Image (cartoon, grey):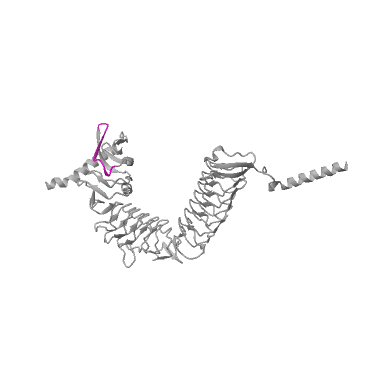
């Protein structure tokens, strides 16, 4: 009898493995998608299917994933689960014996009232412990339900990996203990958005991790607004992108063994003032600013968002700026870039709400969201070699007037959107720029756009401006240049189009007007003599 029990997982593996290899060699296999009940399935091979979606509009309180499903006379085993369970009606999810692969656990725990995962006893790869989902050996914590009522949780000592999105959005949690000698990795988004999480192995008001942890993956603790302190273990090697982004940590220590830090790992940490580093040849700290140093390069990696000081000059030794490097800084009003800087990376100055001016006179490319939400940025010196302004680059900035250089060839979607103070935009003669959708949408004060070049290409919706109420914008253009009919695609933006020189008494015609008046005066004098 015991031998039979031991053979169950072996037989199950064999059932799954044989069709997989057969499918790999069968070139005639055709993927099929079909719906049975509330689930939609997709075939993996001749006998296996993945549950790929669930009808959340008609969700049941306890979702039961079928062990098998029949379609066109063929019975398939359900082995993969890729569904999103996001209806607040759902309180539990039942997982059958053959489901072994859940590639994105964050999807199955989306419902905010799910408080338990129940796994069939015969499942050879998964198990649940008090409603929390683990692998069979309890070495990986896969999914902690959002509605689990306890405010504290001690992770079992068997766990070596906290899985992707395992605790994501678990807003009841305040305390987590991970006193585990073998804990090695905290995967992506593991604690993402835990609104009330304050303590992780808190010792003397300092959150810590076991010394065995070597990897903290992307967004692992992102947007945990009450996680104020954190000491990284000495053995940490990898800190993923945005790992602590948006947390109120005040101090960061970079251990000597750290070999990789992802972009934005400490971005938007509004209280961060101090960064210290055990120099390891790759990362170094100067005046609380973190740099990444290579053989022939030096990258400004993180400027602490809470660092005091209104101005900062980047040393000319710096060859590049990392994505999100200055994101969320509270005090900076002016930044001087190094002479060699030619590009502003993605999000590098995003949400710098005190920034007022910056000299971009050597910059040729401004990347996505580079100055997003810099609400006081009103003075920018553009380069005569600037070619590219990528999407959202200056969204919600403080400009009153913009004059772009004629070198610009690309202006991406929403590049200057929601600039509430912006009144006038000038794109000069000889500009061959391609202007994309909604570049100025939401610029509620904008009344004039001067398109002075016949080579400007306006894409669909390029001149959409109004939001919520009708807005009239004067467009000045060269004679012979036509505004495309689809340059405005909303019903609230009204264009008043003028050719250069058409408007009453424009400045450029003052000389002509004076000459006409002089001629009229001379004619009048002539007739008087006659």
Residue 524 shows up from this direction: yes
Front-lying residue, 451 or 3: 451
Q: Is residue 291 left or right of residue 28?
A: right
Residue 11 placed where, x, y %?
Answer: 19, 43
Residue 488 placed where, x, y %?
Answer: 54, 40
Q: Residue furthest bottom?
A: 204
Front-lying residue, 120 or 91: 91
Q: Residue furthest top?
A: 72
Residue occupying image coordinates x 74% and y 45%: 513
Residue 296 shows up from this direction: no
Query: Is the residue 50 above or below the residue 419 in the image?
Result: above
Residue 519 placed where, x, y %?
Answer: 79, 44
Q: Residue furthest front?
A: 469
Residue occupying image coordinates x 23% and y 43%: 98
Residue occupying image coordinates x 23% and y 50%: 128
Magenta stretch bounds:
60-73
Instruction: Indicate whether residue 68 is drawn in magenta.
Output: yes
Query: Is the residue 286 above or below the residue 489 in the image?
Result: below
Instruction: Indicate whether residue 315 is drawn in magenta.
Output: no
Front-lying residue, 374 or 139: 374
Residue 228 placed where, x, y %?
Answer: 37, 62
């Amino acid at each position: 009898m015991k031998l039979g029990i031991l053979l169950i997982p072996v037989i199950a593996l064999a059932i799954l493995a044989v069709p997989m290899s057969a499918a790999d060699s069968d070139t005639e296999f055709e993927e099929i998608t079909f719906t049975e009940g509330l689930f939609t399935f997709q075939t993996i091979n001749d006998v296996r299917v993945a549950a790929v979606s669930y009808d959340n509009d008609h969700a049941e309180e306890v979702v039961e994933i079928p062990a098998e499903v029949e379609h066109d006379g063929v019975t398939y085993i359900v082995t993969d689960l890729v569904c999103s369970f996001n209806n607040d009606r759902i309180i539990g999810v039942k997982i059958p014996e053959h489901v072994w692969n859940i590639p994105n656990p964050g999807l199955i725990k989306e419902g905010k009232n799910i408080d338990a995962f129940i796994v069939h006893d015969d499942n050879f790869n998964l198990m649940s412990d008090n409603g929390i989902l683990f692998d069979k050996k309890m070495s990986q914590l896969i999914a902690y339900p959002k509605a689990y009522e306890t405010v504290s949780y001690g992770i079992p000592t068997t766990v070596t990996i906290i899985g992707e999105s395992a605790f994501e959005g678990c807003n009841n949690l305040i305390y987590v203990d991970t006193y585990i000698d073998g804990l090695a990795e905290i995967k992506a988004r593991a604690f993402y958005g835990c609104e009330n999480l304050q303590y992780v192995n808190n010792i003397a008001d300092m959150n810590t991790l076991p010394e065995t942890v070597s990897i903290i993956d992307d967004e692992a603790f992102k947007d945990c607004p009450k996680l104020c302190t954190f000491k990284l273990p000495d053995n940490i090697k990898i800190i993923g992108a945005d790992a602590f982004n948006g947390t109120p940590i005040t101090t960061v220590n970079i251990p000597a063994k750290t070999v990789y830090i992802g972009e934005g790992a400490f971005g938007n940490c509004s209280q961060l003032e101090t960064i210290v580093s055990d120099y390891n040849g790759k990362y170094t700290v100067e005046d609380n600013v973190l740099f990444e140093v290579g053989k022939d390069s030096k990258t400004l990696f993180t400027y602490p968002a809470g660092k005091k000081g209104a101005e900062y000059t980047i040393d000319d030794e710096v060859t590049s700026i990392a994505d999100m490097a200055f994101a969320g800084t509270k005090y900076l009003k002016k930044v001087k870039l190094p002479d060699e800087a030619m590009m502003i990376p993605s999000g590098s100055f995003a949400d710098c709400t005190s920034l007022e001016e910056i000299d971009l006179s050597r910059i040729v490319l401004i990347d996505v969201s580079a100055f997003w939400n810099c609400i006081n940025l009103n003075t920018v010196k553009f380069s005569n070699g600037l070619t590219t302004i990528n999407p959202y680059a200056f969204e919600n900035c403080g400009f009153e007037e913009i004059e772009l250089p004629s070198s610009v060839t690309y202006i991406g979607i929403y590049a200057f959107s929601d600039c509430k103070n912006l009144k006038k935009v000038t794109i000069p003669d000889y500009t061959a720029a391609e202007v994309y959708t909604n570049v100025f949408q939401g610029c509620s004060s904008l009344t004039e756009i001067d398109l002075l070049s016949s080579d400007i290409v306006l894409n669909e919706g390029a001149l959409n401006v109004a939001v919520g109420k009708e807005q009239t914008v004067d467009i000045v253009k060269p004679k012979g240049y036509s505004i495309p009919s689809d340059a405005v695609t909303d019903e609230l933006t009204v264009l008043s189009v003028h050719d250069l020189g058409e408007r009453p008494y424009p400045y450029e015609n003052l000389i002509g007007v004076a000459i006409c008046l002089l001629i009229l005066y001379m004619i009048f004098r002539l007739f008087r003599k006659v």
